[in-house]
Image (cartoon, rainbow, N blue to C red):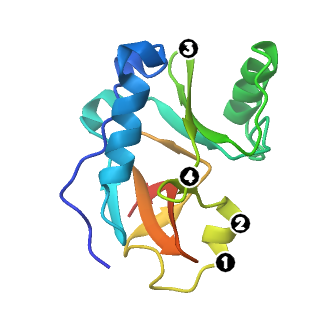
C-alpha cells in the first residue's frame, strides 16, 4: 500500500464550526478524497503541536482509552450531552483546555473502522507505517483508508 501525497483538511482553528460554515463538508470531502489503501497526515501539522485528535466510534459516547486526557475528553463529552448512534462518528480535537467535536455521517463511501478491528487486521491491510490509535498527539496524526466488504473505512492513527 502506498502513502498518498494528499493532505487531510482539518482546520485546527475552526474544527467545530457549524456545518453552515462548510468546515464539516470540507472535512468529509477530504476524507472521501483519500485513495483507498493510503494514509494521509493532517494539513499543516505544525498547528497540531501539543494538540490531540481523538476519534469517537458509533455507539460510543466516550473514549475507551484509560488515560488522564481521555478522562478529560469523556468529562467534556458528558457535560455537552454528547450521544452517539449508528448514523455518525466524530473527531474530537483537544487543545489547551479546549475541546471541539465534529460529527461526520457514515455511508458506504465513508465509514469508521473500529480500533479493535484495525488492531486485528493482518499486516499489509493497513498502509505501511500506519499504527491505529484512539487518540494521537502532534504532527504524526494521520488517517488511513481501506476497503473492506464493499465499504470504504477510515481509521485515525499515527505514522511511524
SS at badge 1: helix
Of residues 25 and 81, the one nearer the viewer is 25
* Cα distance in 3D space between marks 1 and 3: 33 Å
Q: Residue furthest left?
A: 5
Residue 139, visible in the rendered structure: no
* Disc 1 + disc 3, Cβ < 8 Å: no
- Residue at horizontal 34 percent and vertical 26 percent from the top: 11
Query: What residue is shown with label 2?
Result: 116
Where residue 10 appears, x then y in whole percent? Answer: 36, 33
Quadrant containing the N terminus is bottom left
Query: What residue is shown with label 3?
Result: 98
- Residue at horizontal 38 percent and vertical 36 percent from the top: 27
How many numbered circles does the render carry? 4
Query: What residue is shown with label 4?
Result: 107
Q: Quadrant of residue 145?
A: bottom left
* Disc 1 + disc 2, Cβ < 8 Å: yes
Query: What residue is shown with label 1?
Result: 120
Residue 122, visible in the rendered structure: yes
Mark 3 vs mark 4: give the one in front: 4
- Residue at horizontal 34 percent and vertical 41 percent from the top: 29
Nearest to N terminus: mark 1 or mark 4: 4
Nearest to N terminus: mark 3 or mark 2: 3
* Cα distance in 3D space between marks 3 and 2: 28 Å
Where residue 14 appears, x then y in whole percent? Answer: 39, 16
* Cα distance in 3D space between marks 1 and 2: 6 Å
SS at badge 3: loop
**Pointer 4: residues within 10 angstroms few (<14), some, or many (20+)?**
few
Amino acid at each position: 500500500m502506498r502513502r498518498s501525497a494528499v493532505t487531510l483538511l482539518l482546520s485546527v482553528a475552526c474544527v467545530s464550526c457549524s456545518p453552515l460554515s462548510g468546515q464539516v463538508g470540507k472535512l468529509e470531502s477530504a476524507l472521501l478524497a483519500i485513495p483507498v489503501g493510503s494514509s494521509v497526515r493532517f494539513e499543516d501539522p505544525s498547528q497540531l503541536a501539543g494538540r490531540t485528535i481523538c476519534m469517537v466510534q458509533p455507539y460510543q459516547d466516550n473514549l475507551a482509552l484509560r488515560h488522564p486526557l481521555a478522562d478529560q475528553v469523556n468529562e467534556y463529552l458528558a457535560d455537552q450531552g454528547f450521544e452517539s448512534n449508528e448514523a455518525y462518528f466524530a473527531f474530537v480535537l483537544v487543545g489547551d483546555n479546549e475541546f471541539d467535536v465534529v460529527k461526520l455521517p457514515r455511508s458506504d463511501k465513508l465509514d469508521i473502522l473500529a480500533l479493535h478491528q484495525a488492531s486485528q487486521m493482518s499486516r499489509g491491510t493497513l498502509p505501511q507505517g500506519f499504527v491505529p490509535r484512539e487518540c494521537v498527539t502532534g504532527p504524526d496524526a494521520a488517517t488511513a483508508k481501506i476497503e473492506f466488504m464493499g465499504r470504504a473505512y477510515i481509521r485515525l492513527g499515527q505514522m511511524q
